[in-house]
Structure formats: C-alpha cells, structure tokens
Image (cartoon, rainbow, N blue to C red):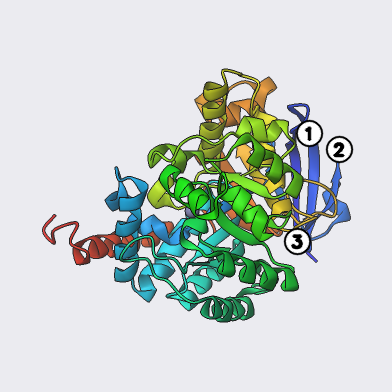
Amino acid sequence: MNGFLIQNADIADLDRLKTNTRDILIRDGRFEKIAGKIDKKDYPGVTVIDAHNMLALPGFTDSHSHVYQTFIKGPLDNLIITDWLVRLFKFEDAMTDEDYYYATLLSCLSAMRFGTTTINEMGGWEHLDATLQAFEDAGIRTTFGISTTDIPENEVTPIISVEEALKRSEIVYEKTHGRNHGLMKASVAPAGLPAVSGKMAVALKNWANERGLIYHTHLGEGKMETERVAKEYGLNGEAEALQQLGVLDEHTLLAHSIWLSDHELDIIAESKAVPVHCPNTNMKISDGIPKIAQMLQRGIPVAMGCDGEASSGTKDMVREGKAGSYLQKAITLDPTVMDAGTTFKMMTINGAKALGYDDLGEIKEGYQADLVLVNMEDDLSLTDRDHRIGNLLYAGTGHAVDTVFVAGELKVRNKKIQNFDEQYIISKCNDMIHRLNVRTGYVKESD
Ligand SMILES: [Zn+2]
C-alpha cells in the first residue's frame, strides 16, 4: 500500500477563517491520518509532497453542470434565455459522438485544473456512451442524470413520454451507477417545470426514491417561465408546485432558485431541499438574482455550481464563489453575507452532502481524499499569510490551484493535469470547435 504523505499543509478552518499546519497521510483513497508530524519512515513507499506555503481545502463540488456546453461558449453570447435555448438545441443537434467525448473531457479537465473534484451533471441522452466514457477517462467524481422534458418550450425542444423517460433513466442507471470504482453515481434530472409535466416529475421522483438517487432539476430560473408555471398550477411559484407534487426533500437539488416568494423559501427550508447558486450564469444571461442571503438565514444548506459554460463562461469554482459572494453583498447592502468560510462550505461540504455523501467534503480522518492544495506564495496577488482563505476567494482564481487529488489519486500537480497531454487536447478541441461553428453556419470556413 503506497499513497501520499503531504507535509506542512495549511489546512483551512472554514469556521474560524484560520489555518492549521498539519501533515496529511492519504492511503486507499482516504485521509488515513492527519497530525502535526507524520514520520515518512513509518510508511515505506509513500510519495512525499512538500506543501509548505500551500493552503489545503476539500475538493470543490460543482453541484450543477452541463459539461458538453464547453464547445458552445462563444455562439451563445448575448442572448436572452428563450433565444439562448433555441440556439443551444441547434448546436446539440450538430454535435457528434466525438464532439461530446472531447467537450466532456475538456470541461472535466479544466474543472479539475481549477480544483473541482465532483461534478453533478445534467447531461444529454444522445451520445450517452461517449459522454460517460469521457467522465470515466477524466477520472472526476460524477453524479450523472439526463435532462428530460415532455412539454415543448419552443419548436426544437426534444420531448419524450414519461414511459420513455423512465426507460432511459433505467439505462443510465445501469451504465453509470457505481462505475469507475464507485466514483460515478446516477441521478434523475428533469429539466424543470416549464418543460416538465407534473406526471413526469412525480414518476421520476418515485423512481429515484426507490433506488436512493437524487432528483436534480432547474427551479425558477426565467422570470416569464416561472410566472407561466405559477398561473398553470394556480399557485404562487414553481417551488409551491414542486411541494404540491411531493418532490421536495433533502435528496432534491434545485439549480438557480431565483424567482421564489418568501413563503417558498420557507417551504424549501422545511423540505431540506438544496438550492444551487449559479451566479455567473444568472448574471451573464440576465436571469436575475436569487435570495441566497435569506436562504442562508433560514438555515438552508445552499450549494454552488458553475452550470454550463455556454451560460456561465467558466468552470472555475473560485470565480463562481467570488461572483456569488459579491452579488449577495451588493443586493443586500450587507457585507457580512456569504463570508469566505460560508462560501467555501457552499463550494464543498454542502454540495457533497446534497449528493448523498457522508464521508466527503471535509479534510477529516476516514473521509474520501478529495483534496486541493493552493500555492499561496507563487502569486503576487495572494500575499498575506494571515488571511489566506479570504485572499484566495477575493483576490484569487482557480489558476492558483497547484495540486488536486480525487479519491486519493493525483490528478493535478504543479498546475498541470496528470495523465493527459494538455497541448494535444487544446489543439484537437480548437479544431473540433471551429468545425462545429462552420457546420452550424455561425462561422465561415475562411474565418
Ligand atoms: Zn442548468
């Protein structure tokens, strides 16, 4: 049994916004021992990593994602959500198996490069095998469900019956759950009530409950769509509708959760469902600003997500956390909201728990070894040994991440992805994206 001995890491205490210098022994995929001094001689064969000047954080959990969108970042700029969706579906249609494989791989690797160790993916049914293979090859922890809809929001929405949604969910479950040494889990992921009937929502929730899986959906993202759903149900909003359908509980993740009444915040608090804050998307495609401060006041364990890059532009959880924190401080006129400790918990333990893990999201003996080390002394902007946690969030980006472990496996070292030739992937994906842009008519061959 080999493993890693990380010496002199400054482990973040997110409650006190302080750090504690410790050695960390990782073996068999877990944090085996954390102590002031661990002698290498006691553990023959371990690889020693000197983490002097490194801030140690749990790996980040991106709790709402559509990774394949990394190939469609540019063509969807400056569109409102309804037009954005139509163009998104046009690009999805034009993407091949190979596009899905490389888009998924590219997005997973850039997320991991920035410290993300878990992705909660709402993916597509088409090109499923290529997508799942890319998640497995990237080696990132993944919860995967397919986006399903049975109400057409526009002329290009791919709709299916409830029976077909259940059939597909069964196939996804068989192909995904427990795959890659248990790093992959299945979920159900109905897109959201504007495009999902009550019948489909209830059927998928029951099906997920029978298998102990999470229910991952969008909630209250677009103002107009939310108003339409509220009118159809004769209620005040989508959260009230989900409560009436019986799908809100601690195994439900609610991406965005913007257009909610205060009463609906109470409903969510009582249900223990977990909203996922995706601030970059909310700002870039002008969705609006969720009431995160009021959620946190009610004790709701909000998680964070980078969403798809066609709407957020990034898979960098540090930039996502910073954007979310600043946005809430501005809208509430209260600088104490979403302090660095709260924000990093939203980026780590809150997401891990929401995805059903009780041994992930903290640097603790016996927990799964998903770990981020940030070099705080090779970047001029991060200088201040006494305020490292706040400094990383407010002054840093994911580029400061130096080393990443997923389940005790070394994935990033010295800011470089291990096991892949980054330059080859960049060059290959650049060519593929250009060909996709030409195929869809948004770029000319000669451009
Ligand atoms: Zn989304």
Badge 3 crowding class, 10 Å Cα cut-off, few under 14, some 14 to 19, many 20 or more, is some
Nearer to us of marks 1 and 3 is 3
* Label total for image: 3
x%, y% of residue 321? 56, 36
Q: Residue 21 bears which disc, if any?
A: 1
Q: Residue 235 bears which disc, if any?
A: none
Contact check, label 2 and label 3, Cβ < 8 Å: no
Q: Considering only order in the chain, which callout, 3 or 1, is on the residue closer to the N terminus?
A: 1
To which residue does mark 3 refer?
29
Q: CA distance from mark 1 to mark 3?
A: 22 Å
Q: CA distance from mark 1 to mark 2?
A: 7 Å
Residue 408 as seen in the image, left or right of residue 383: right
Work out whether residue 269 can be spotted.
Answer: yes
Residue 313 as seen in the image, left or right of residue 177: left
Contact check, label 1 and label 2, Cβ < 8 Å: yes
Say which residue appears at 37% left-offset and 48% top-offset. 81
Which image quarter is the N terminus in?
A: bottom right
Q: Amino acid at mark 3?
A: Gly
Say which residue appears at 74% left-offset and 48% top-offset. 272
Which image quarter is the C terminus in?
A: bottom left
Where disc 2 sits, the SS reads loop
Q: Is residue 418 above or below residue 169?
A: above
Question: Closer to the camera, 253 or 173?
Answer: 253
x%, y% of residue 285? 38, 42
Where disc 1 sits, the SS reads strand
